[in-house]
Image (cartoon, helix red, strand yellow):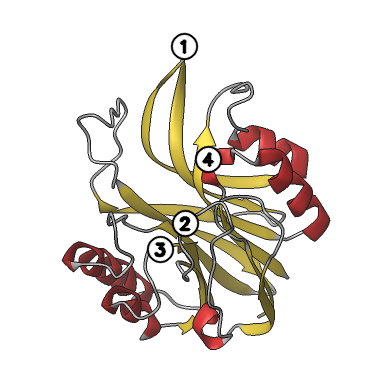
Amino acid sequence: MKLIQVNIWCGKLGYQLIDFLNDQQPDIVCMQEVSDLPGPAGPLFLTFEEIREATNFPHAALAPMFAYRFMKRKYQFCNAILSKLPLRDQKIEFTRGTYLDDFDELQDDINIRNFQDVTIDIQGKTLHIINHHGHFVKGSKDGNQETLRQMKILADYIENLTGPIVVCGDFNLVPTSSSIHQLDQKLINLPVKYGIKNTYSFLNIHRVVCDYIFVSKDIVVKSFEVAEKTVSDHKALIMEFEL
């Protein structure tokens, strides 16, 4: 099976992303900074449904964090998972704040955060796919007490799961941070294991690892790489695996 992790930058490079996904033909895609909007957004960005329809994924799950009025429609900022395999269930857990239906960046906290946990039945096993967009600390990727608190919530959640687990996301944290170490104690950190040095594209000023795929020990990783094709200000991570 093939899984791709990518922060899609709200779909600003949506056509490049579509070409990339159609070329790679993944079974599962975990995405952050997803724009959910009824109808097209014109030349500004591609929406979740536009990307989904162009890549022919039959199954999908959205985890919106906040919404606001866009033209005369409702825009939602989301985490999202696309899948060629049926999704049996989804749970959404907030690590900071709660869903806000009338978000205004001038007065509201942009760091509303959640993670989604979808389950997929494969070969008699229940696979957990957890997708998260991490707390943003301005000027630093080292984290702070707030990122540590949120990662402990995710780590405690993982502790209570059974069966194979994959955790994906743009965590906004470098591998040496105490916050990321919370997950290192539970799962295998693939960017660290494979010696990855950067997960940002040339469109971003950062040159560090902030995007991750973590796996439980019962997942057999056949290959792992950082894609060179530019589809966002982040690079996509590609994992092939077996249960």
Q: Quadrant of the N terminus?
A: bottom right
Q: Which mark is first along the chain, 4 or 3?
A: 4
First in residue order: circle 1 vs circle 3: 1
> In this rendering, does residue 48 appear at all?
yes
The percent coordinates of residue 68 (x first, y second) are 37, 25
Q: Secondary structure at mark 1?
A: loop
Quick one: label 1, few (<14), some, or many (20+) residues within 10 Å? few
Say what secondary structure mark 2 lies in.
Answer: loop
Which amino acid, mark 3?
A: Phe
Q: CA distance from mark 3 to mark 4?
A: 16 Å
Dot 1 or dot 2, earlier in sequence:
1
- The residue tagged with tag 3: helix, strand or loop? loop
Q: What distance separates the C-alpha of mark 3 from that of mark 2?
A: 16 Å
Residue at image mark 1: 72
Using the image, tell me which numbered label, if any, was put on residue 171. Answer: 3
Q: Earlier in the sequence, mark 3 or mark 2?
A: 3
| Disc 2 to disc 4: CB gap under 8 Å | no
Instruction: Give the labeled residue for mark 4.
Output: 10
Depicted 47 relative to depicted 207: above or below = above
Q: Nearer the viewer, mark 3 or mark 2?
A: 2
Q: Mark 1 or 4 closer to N-term?
A: 4
Residue at 68%, 65% in the rendered image: 227
Q: Nearer the viewer, mark 1 or mark 2?
A: 2
> Quick one: 12 or 114, which is closer to the camera?
12
Between circles 2 and 4, the one closer to the viewer is 2
Q: Which amino acid does the dot numbered 4 rest on?
A: Cys
Query: Is the residue 224 above or below the residue 83 in the image?
Result: below
Mark 2 lies on residue? 205
